[in-house]
Image (cartoon, coloured by chain):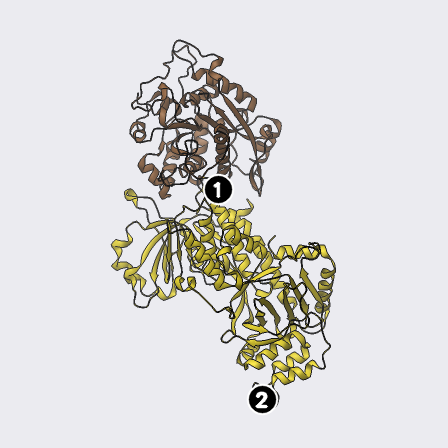
Amino acid sequence: MPKSNTMRSISRAALRPYICHSCRNGVGAGRRRFATNSSQTPEIYDVVCVGGGPAGLGLLAALRASPVTSKLKVALVESQDLRKARSWNLDSAQFSNRVSSLTPSTVEFLRKIKAWEHLDVDRVQEYQDMQVWDGETGSRISFDWSTETSPFEDMRTVATMTENANLVRGLLSRIEASGDENLTLFSNTTVASIENGSDLQSEGPDLSAWPIISVAPTAPGAQAQSQTRIAARLLVGADGINSPVRSFADISTQGWDYNRHGIVATLALGDPDKPSFPANMRTAYQRFLPALGGPIALLPLPNNHATLVWSTTPENAAYLKSLSTPAFLAMVNAAFRLSMTDLTYMMGMERSSDQFSHEDELIWRLQHTPKQSQIPPSAIGVQEGTVASFPLRFRHASQYISPRVALVGDAAHVIHPLAGQGLNLGMADVAALSRTIEYAVSHGMDIGDLLTLERYSSERYLPNAKIGGACDLLHKMYTIPGQGPITWARSLGLDVIDRLPFVKSFLMKNAEGY
Amino acid sequence: MASLRPRSLALRALRTAPTSSGPLYRHTSPLPSLLPQRSPNNRSHSTSSVSADEVSHFSKLASSWWDPMGPSRILHLMNPLRHEFIASCLADSAPAGSPLPQFSTPETAANLDYLDIGCGGGIFAESLARTIPLDRATSAPTPTRAASMTAIDPTTTLIQIARDHARMDPTVEAHMRSGRFQYLNTTLEDVLAGSTPASASASASAPASSSSPTGHQQFDMVTLFEAFLANCLRALKPGGWLIGSTISRTFPSWILNQVIAEAPWPIGVVPRGTHEWSKFVNPSELYSWAQEGLMRAADTNVTRAGPSALDGMRWKCVGTIYVPGLGWKIVPGSEDWGNYFWAVKKGI
């Protein structure tokens, strides 16, 4: 059978104990001391989700929303304080720098599980057009739905910008609204260890192939005394790139580091040169900067704000972060306007020269740069404390499932952010896994059984590999500087795609999960 | 004879009218035996309907019975469809309206008793047991409406495998403890004769309700086919369903099931020797046997039942096809091509 080589056989040895690094020293002693405790029946849950980010909370909210799965006994383990996330609040003129672009299919999923209404919609921003161009050659492509909609309807949304904190708060609020029956949220709690259970012989069921999770409070004073042991019919790893659940299931990952950092910041924008038409139409901008190692993107937020994502080399990232606010803004504006040569020069300027500031340099160089259409409004302010950077990586788990284990989101795949797909792939995983669980419950299947879980993994593995691979390819094509065959080919490709509506809408549908 | 008949007999038949049991099926225990005492010249049989050769074939597969990638994979994959077919039978006999309402009503309450004849390692029986509500008061209704499940198989090894595996699911294990789910190492004939020692205590705690026998995979496992069908129908309460799946004996089915499915890896999907061509049954044959069986089941010591035994009978039949890479699909009209599900409802 074709699937057999991608799937491990269901031997109990496949389940290995996982002990997190910080607990490795103390756990042995703790276990010995509480030997009587560990022989007792652990509390049994249907689904235990490790990780309370958008993916983990999305799964919980989806399970609680479906009448078929709402009675399942579920638990969530999160090391951060969920109460803080639940009460997150920010002034309407301020925005978190952790922002995601939600595709229409993600929004549709959130609406279906009745979570969307729990988001603060005044803080989200839809956009209907995305301008993407090559900083080397100027080739340009415009992603919008104009070929699919008549001139008389509103332009369809390409994506919706949402702060992750807004999404997390909304999902928590949705879960809260479902009541607390059969629901346990372990907040401020880490996974101390994951081990196989034991056969309770005449006392109860044979749990020797079931993962038993020991959870412990993160508070510094708390010790092993307060560990709680829970058994999971299905253990879901929504626990990020260094997933403990993945380690426990002994699932390997392939991947590499891009040697790039993504710089994020919340920016205030000046007025556009010409007012947008129609008035509520918003545009996202992305310019590939091959000479600097990656694209810069400016994605709209409400009230004329925008979020910046600039992928570049670690050296450039360190340089940009060390600049004063006016110099940083000058670099951002330059990155959307100047030629590669000018930009490379400015990236090497002395940081605090009295005579030659980045601002003056930009003004002078712009006078000698041809005026372009379709560039974003100037960035005029940086929200304090929002400039940050993170390393860009590619990871793909060799499989998403193992007996009684499923991985979702970053635990399963981490991709280059240039298409803003990471969170959307995670939500698509969650939608597929919750559908799989629903199907299993209504068909008498064990939700932790490989025969159930393979439905999830066969639905998600290839699409995720495809999107991740496409982003990787784009990254590699657009980090080749200068003029050359690849540069010409990629520009020709962009121009051709822009002129072929069918190809373009095919690509867009792929990118949006339709 | 402490028969477990009223509560849990039914191999795979589902009954839908819980409150209308006649005196024969009143849930007082022990029941007076109203099974016909068959005289030798009656249409009775003295041997078990189980073929020894087939029992040994399936015993050999025992160790890998529950391996999702093993030789029984194809059988595992058919399971969800069995549930869908059972749900469609229940929907057929339910009054027109909502298929699965949110609240329990007499039409949706979990009040059906299932019997699985020839349960093997428990692939279907365990999945059905999982749909029995742990707490009938608070649980959402399930499509099978199962209240209890009795699964029988003559092979000791397989019953042991089934029991061991069932213990690995706490829900199913709880049902075994409470007696709502039981595996019995016995034959249908012994169950009907009331000579199964383990049955009396196990069934005593089962809540009184209607029977839902279902009969599934491998009707070719049964040799004395006609007599067997009559026994199944005897085990069934009025209004219950006898449900099975088998393979038709046609040329396309021979190509699919003998030539292709049992071909060597990587083409074949089941081990050689799983199917025995001559024991396959066509839907038309099954239909006439079901009619015959209903009449036999209504026979008494002194009279033979006539066509009135067929009053209220329902017949359902739908083909299923395995598409490599996609799995099993229900394809109406494909009954003659190979695998199909069938169901007989006994009149009230």
Front one among B225 and A111: A111
Q: Colour of chain B?
A: brown
- The image quadrant of residue B200 is top left
Q: Which residue is mark 1?
A: B70
Label placed on residue B194: none
Counting from the top left corner in percent of width and height, residue B309 is at 46, 16
- The image quadrant of residue A309 is bottom right
Q: Secondary structure at mark 1?
A: loop
Mark 2 Cα-neighbour bin, 10 Å: few <14, some 14–19, many ≥20:
few
Q: Which residue is mark 2?
A: A353
Counting from the top left corner in percent of width and height, residue A61 is at 46, 53
Which tag is nearer the camera, tag 1 or tag 2? 2
- Left or right: residue A176 versus residue B278 is left
Q: Secondary structure at mark 2?
A: loop
Kind of residue at disc 2? Ser
Kindly identify the residue that appears in the image at 32 percent across and 62 percent down: A27
Chain letter, colour yellow: A
Do the numbered discs 1 and 2 sit on residues whose CB atoms are within 8 Å? no
Same chain under badges 1 and 2? The reply is no
Q: Looking at the image, can residue B69 be seen?
A: no
Counting from the top left corner in percent of width and height, residue B229 is at 46, 21
Q: Looking at the image, can residue B126 be seen?
A: yes
Front one among A128 and B117: A128
Kindly identify the residue that appears in the image at 69 percent across and 63 percent down: A142
Front one among A152 and A61: A152
Counting from the top left corner in percent of width and height, residue A121 is at 53, 60
| Up-down relation of residue A486 to residue A250 (above or below) | below
Q: Chain of mark 1?
A: B
Q: Chain of mark 2?
A: A
Kind of residue at disc 1? Gly
Separation of disc 1 and disc 2 at Cα? 72 Å
